[in-house]
Amino acid sequence: MSNSVSSVDIDSLEGRLGYHFSDKSIVLEALTHRSYAHEKKNKQNYERLEFLGDAVLQLIVTEYLLDRYKDYDEGLLSKLRGYFVSEGFLSRIAIELKLGEHILLGKGEKASGGKYKESLLCDIFESVVAAIYLDGGYGFARDIIIRHFGSRIDEDISNSSFVDAKSELQKISQRKFGTLPDYTVLDEKGPEHDKIFVVRVDVETLVSEQGIGKTKKSAEKDAAKNALRKLGNEK
């Protein structure tokens, strides 16, 4: 993996993470996509580290929630944990850390906008967490994770961002009107790696609201949240 060092700005990544790796090969492995490994005939890529990082994150988030939200029952804590280790949440953190700039991608994956894909950003974030864990231990990994999104966890809980707006709207629509919300893509603009979707959701003839997002799914969630607000059932 040493031939990859010059192609990754490890110093700037360490600066944003707030962690200095003793073993650079671990973080390079965490940033290496299988397409790049195949081109360079390397055996290692981020996938095994992602597997470990997912488990480390689950534990860190679980401990944080148990410590901070002592009055919450197991069901709600489980729902919260699922949200805070989800692709949507973790990819937002990865974007803030500019992880996409550091991923080692093969030519084809790079050309298709791989460094902008939410699923890959989430995976790479998990693999970097594993790299910190292996390099510095659980304490360092926990401290860095909490530093980067402990306050975000508290903020999202306080404003109920963890609520699944689409599921809530579906329940209300079925209960009140006996029908399901209808989602329509109104517009899709921008380059392939940076699209913006505009979606409208209709609930019977009473509510028609729009939402925007980087993906169709996120635009639908935004529209559903706006519809819930209109119905007076935002939670």
Image (cartoon, rainbow, N blue to C red):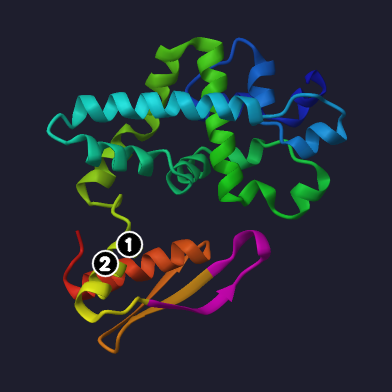
Q: Quadrant of residue 81?
A: top left
Image position of 191 (left or right of 68): right
Q: Quadrant of residue 104?
A: top right
Give the residue at x 48% y 11%.
Answer: 137
Q: Mark 2–mark 1 contact, CB under 8 Å? A: yes
Range of magenta residues: 182-196
Residue where numbered disc 2 is placed: 171
* Residue farthest to the front, as pictured: 178
Quadrant including the C terminus = bottom left
* Residue farthest to the bottom, as pictured: 205
State the image coordinates of residue 16 (x, y, percent, origin top left). 50, 30
Amino acid type of the residue tagged 2 in the rendering: Lys
Nearest the viewer among 141 and 45 is: 45
Residue 24, numbered circle: none
Q: Is residue 162 magenta?
A: no
Say above or below: 234 vs 134: below
Q: Residues within 10 Å of mark 2 (few under 14, many from 20)?
A: some
Residue where numbered disc 1 is placed: 167
Say above or below: 60 vs 97: above
State the image coordinates of residue 78 (x, y, percent, origin top left). 30, 38
Image position of 229 (left or right of 54): left
Q: Does residue 98 appear in this view? A: no
Q: Is residue 195 magenta?
A: yes
Give the residue at x 39% y 20%.
Answer: 142
The residues bearing labels 2 and 1 have C-alpha atoms spaced at a distance of 6 Å
Image position of 175 (left or right of 54): left
State the image coordinates of residue 136 (x, y, percent, origin top left). 51, 11
Give the residue at x 54% y 79%.
Answer: 187
Q: Main SS type for the magenta part?
A: strand
Amino acid type of the residue tagged 1 in the rendering: Ser
Quadrant including the N terminus = top right
